[in-house]
Image (cartoon, rainbow, N blue to C red):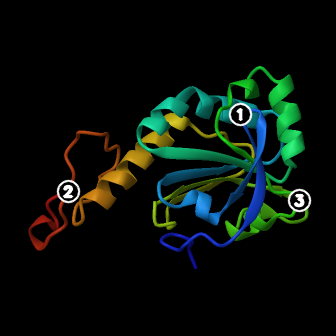
Amino acid sequence: MSLINTEIKPFSATAYHNGKFIDVNQDSLKGKWSVVVFYPADFTFVCPTELEDLADHYDEFQKLGVEVYAVSTDTHFSHKAWHDTSDAISKVKYPMIGDPTHVLANNFEVLIAEEGVALRGTFVISPEGQIKVMEVHDNGIGRDASELLRKVKAAQYVAAHPGEVCPAKWEEGAATLTPSLDLVGKI
């Protein structure tokens, strides 16, 4: 069964955010669009490139009313230490959630149990708490924040325009499609 269109499961965790430790739970992800980005571990190699890319695009996500959450199975203490020592991670202004109990990684079905780390999972969550976009990568494959932004915009557009869909490579302002009998076989 896919997680698409399912509601996020309950959780309670601690995040490092803007110099403080904050509590985060399933309700924190509701009421606005959210992006949850799982990564394997702090102090690694591909992970800082991804989190820095998200940090470089964070203002664009914020303009769309989207909060970004980075999650690994490390603790929130480890997130703070990484933030304090890495030039790339020091740019991060979004919450970095610690998941040492693996509740979140299990809820989102990205845990590699025998390693105790998460796959590179990306989830776009609607204000109602439903998963609208889900993408899971092998840990050797980094993600691109620009492509994630495009997917968020498409998810927001489809939510705001029932009956319309966004075709491949759709960009904000481009034509959409309205599925109908007249469209069958014409594309």
Task: State the image coordinates of residue 159 (x, y, percent, origin top left).
Answer: 33, 60
Residues at circles 2 and 3 in contact by the CB criterion of under 8 Å:
no
Q: Amino acid at mark 3?
A: Gly
Residues at circles 1 and 3 in contact by the CB criterion of under 8 Å:
no
| Residue beneath the point at 48% across and 71% down | 5
Q: Residue furthest top?
A: 87
Tell me the element at label 1: loop
Tell me the element at label 2: loop
Left or right of 178: which side holds 121? right
Q: Residue furthest left?
A: 182
Task: State the image coordinates of residue 127 (x, y, percent, origin top left).
Answer: 46, 60
Looking at the image, can residue 69 be seen?
yes
Question: Quadrant of residue 110 in the image?
Answer: bottom right
Q: Tell me the number on the disc at residue 177.
A: 2
Q: Please count the marks in the image.
A: 3
Q: Amino acid at mark 1?
A: Asn
Q: Nearer the viewer, mark 2 or mark 1?
A: 1
Question: Label 1 belongs to which residue?
Answer: 18
Comes first in the chain, label 1 or label 3? 1
| Residue beneath the point at 28% across and 57% down | 160
Q: Amino acid at mark 2?
A: Leu
What's the CA distance linking mark 2 and mark 1? 41 Å
Comes first in the chain, label 2 or label 3? 3
Q: Tell me the number on the disc at residue 116.
A: 3
Q: Quadrant of the C terminus?
A: bottom left
